[in-house]
Image (cartoon, helix red, strand yellow):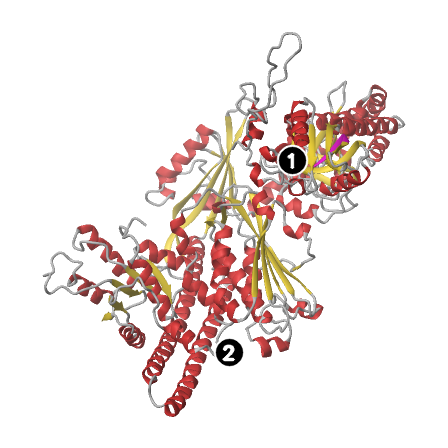
Amino acid sequence: MNNSTSVSSARPWTGSSNNKRRRIFDWLSHPELESITSFQRFILDIDWNTSPLGPINAWPAQLRQMVLLVIQDPSPAVIYWGDEATIVYNEAYTELIGQKHPALQGQDPRTGFAEIWIHFEKLLTEQRETAETVVEANAFLLLYRHGFLEETYFSWKFVPIIGSEGWVVGSHATVVEVTREVIGDRRLRHVHALSREVSLSRTIKELWARLIRGIKDAEKDIPIALLYSIADSATTSSLAPSKPEASTVTGSPSPSICVLEGAVGIPTGNELAPQVIDVELSDSCLGIALKEAQLEMGPVVVPVKERTQKQFKLLEWRGFGVPSTHLGVFPIITNDSNSLLAFLVVGLNPRRPFDEDYRSFLVSLTQQVTTPQLSAVILREEVERRQSLARQEALDRDRLSRELSEAETKFAKFANRAPIGLAVLSPDGFAQSANELWRELTQLQVSSMRVSWNDVLAEGELEPVNAGWEKMLTEKQPVTVQTRIKRPWKAPEPDPEGNVWADTYIMLSMYPDFDGNGEVTSVMSCVTDIRQWSENLLRRKMLQAIELKEQTERHIDLTSHEMRNPLSALVGCADEILASLNEVRRNLKGQDATRAEKTLNLIDEAMEAADTIIYCAMHQKRIIDDILTLSRLDSNLLRISPEPSQPLVLVRGVLKMFEAELKRAAIVLDFVEEDSLTGLAVEWVLLDSSRVLQVLINLMTNAIKFTRTESEERRIVIRMGASMVKPSETNPIKVQYVTKSNASPDQTMRVEWGTGEVLYLCITVQDTGRGLDEGEIKNLFHLFTQASPKTYQTYGGSGLGLFISRQLVEMQGGEIGVAAKKGHGSTFQFYVKTRRAPAGNQADLPILLREDALREACAVETSGLNGKMSSMQAEASVLPASDKAPAVYHILVVEDNLVNQKVVMKQLCKAGHIVNVANHGAEALEFIKKSEFCKHTDSGLAQKLNVVLMDLEMPVMDGITAVKKISQLQAEGTIVRHLPVIAVTANARKDQISLSLDAGMDDVITKPYRLTDMLEHIDTLLFKEPVRRGSK
């Protein structure tokens, strides 16, 4: 976008001698110049109307001149202009600010430089007052420019710009980054200090101690450090007597056993710094890193595992006070013999990248240990140690020769007593030796040394065993075969067919042994008598567990269905009462005033009673929903299902549902979209929108409940923001977050969450209600617990909402908490973990954000009993209000519950529609075949039909089967055009709703519902462009 204008009327300057026209370089005034650079074009294309500076053609001459000056400067330079300190920088400056460019250009730096602006705001404020130039060298800044807070150092000069009015109108700054120089000097000092320290060593033990002492001052570059030496056999035997593999026969050093010599930043005895670690066996983050460095014989850097990250958070960190995200392992290797002496493990500086400078610094530290003068100390001890080991080796050989015969005798006894068959076979299958059980199971005769497997194995088992033997010999790998032998075995309980006798199952394992050339010399054979019935029992138990889970899920669904169905009839009857009374009210107009007034009073009382019925029914529905949600949580049946969503669209949609209630309660609602949403470009993310909105609706409902009774200011403020780190780590408003429980594990680590960039969405609900004291805050977020006993008496509720909200938030990798003070309102805040996602399908949003469900959830407890509705409000709540709808709909109601069937039919008929009923899906199909939707129907006798309201749980044929049959008939051409079908169900689980839509339903409404909700669904569906069933 070009906001500049050319100055065509200005006379060019002419020389006195040759009168030639001078070249124009003012690209701000002449954007058409061919000499404009790409960066100058970038500045011209900025939408300056959105900047505090305004369009370029409105800039003062001094600003234009300064911009031309700065852009031509090859060194990093910047202008801060006006009271807003609007920033304009040159191309060289972009190298200093990283990913903040290009969004920062021409904008308010208070947002772009939020993490460091407090420093510059003070500087610029003082300069406006003093007009003095400010020079500063090697200034430290924690700058967010490459995806993390980075330790940086800069030198700068700020020169005031004095305007024509005589005061300071801006500042011109030249900046030089000196990060590498400052940190390099610091690291060089650490290297020299370590060199002085270790040069005083006289023994290896003293060398390790002085190495640890020499790096203690390097708090920023080495926040934590561990020093592990390679243990010799004597050390290993004393430290790890329970691990015979840790020592060796010869007494030579064991490269797999490492001994801790010292630590920095980790207290003694901490599990993060084990005294002894076996590199070959350890699966810890530290053990894996040591093994990799041992194989590489050079430095390695590994990320910190999640389990170790949790342990790191418990430490008091040196340096910048935050845990390291990577570990560096640096082997200490002698220069002369290239022998591995030790490992230096370093937690890397989380505020600096691990670059070549950082690597060279740490390598230099380890090299101080292997200088020539120190190598002499190491060599002297190595010679003494090897002489000692040689003497020990001779003693060990004598001892082992004596123990060998004893070991053979003991092994022979062990083999005969072992509960498994053991044998040593030759490559051609002869038994060289075998214990008694192996002979018994294979029927090997004492006089024979070869097994007749054809006589031993059950029918059909010889071929798999021979194939396993050949595979073992060919591939030279151990092989295990499960087979049957001809040995009758009686099971302790019959199988499903009633049989108790069966063949004996054995596990035949074969392990080859090799000579020096890699050829098989013998085979160790193990035969285990396995109990197949126990496997079957385990399988049955597994199937029973799966069946129990399915039964639990069916029980919850059935409970939901049986609880919601009567409520649907109850709400329908109350709506019908209200409709009838409204009709009587209209009929009384114009009659005798006194008589009519008495009748109207009676009608008002009856309408208030009907309104109370609806309120109580909807209140009961919410309690039922909470209890069912709690049951799913207890049964581990509730899953978080991420889908691409637009958080702002979702939240705005929910808040719109509260407009009427807020207006009745005279409460002002403010929705604040924090700058972080724009700064992080939050558009589409992966989250379970229904579960996030469930928490927001609960908090919003509570806020209305506690604010509507306040006589002073009634206001609710909703804030939404995003961050790259957990909001609980920054916590500017001092929210008391609830300690996470183990009952709701984080589900955001599953594969369906993808690998997008992690973001944290934070929503805050602030009200001006009565607030909470410390005692009441402690009672929140617990099961069946409210702030105080008076809460229920005054405001109602079950004590489930906040507990369920806590579980749902924690399942989404977040936390929830409150900041409140008695008499000053409350602030509830929660955040969830999300990942960036590609743009989703806008057509899918109605599935996630169904208006009728939100209306029920957000309005049920805040309306009704707190005040009588006016007659117009009552009338509007029970009568359809669509001016788009035709005068009459032809509706087929498919419902097996006769009470609900009758209530719905009467409501729809009273609203002016023509209704037919069917008791199940089969009857519905028969009716449809006689309707105008089928091509074989006589047009004169065809039943008219606009829409089908289909229950799901029905005898004979359920709703899902029926709608699939309708889709099939449409595909075959029997049904000539799309027939709209709305599922009406008491099962409100999200996966059940998705199942209905996938089966071919056009829409879903859950019981109980208001007639107005149903008619809105019908209106919306019938006025949409028809879609082809099955394309969903």
**Which residue reaches farthest top?**
18
Residue segment shown in magenta: 149-158
From the viewer's perspective, tell me whether residue 865 is left or right of residue 891: right
Mark 1 lies on a secondary structure that is: loop
- The amino acid type, in three-letter code, at marker 2 is Gly
Which numbered circle lies on residue 867?
A: 2
Q: How many marks?
A: 2
Q: Going 59% across and 44% down the picture, which residue do you hit?
A: 414
Question: Percent position (x, y) of residue 647?
Answer: 51, 51
Question: Percent position (x, y) of residue 301?
Answer: 66, 32
Mark 2 residue crowding within 10 angstroms, few (<14) / some (14–19) / many (20+): few
Q: Is residue 639 visible?
A: no
User: What residue is disc 1 on?
Assistant: 145
Question: Percent position (x, y) of residue 261?
Answer: 79, 37
Question: Percent position (x, y) of residue 631?
Answer: 49, 66
Q: Is residue 705 visible?
A: yes
Q: Going 41% across and 69% down the picture, which residue do you hit?
A: 560
Res 717 → quadrant: bottom right
- The amino acid type, in three-letter code, at marker 1 is Arg
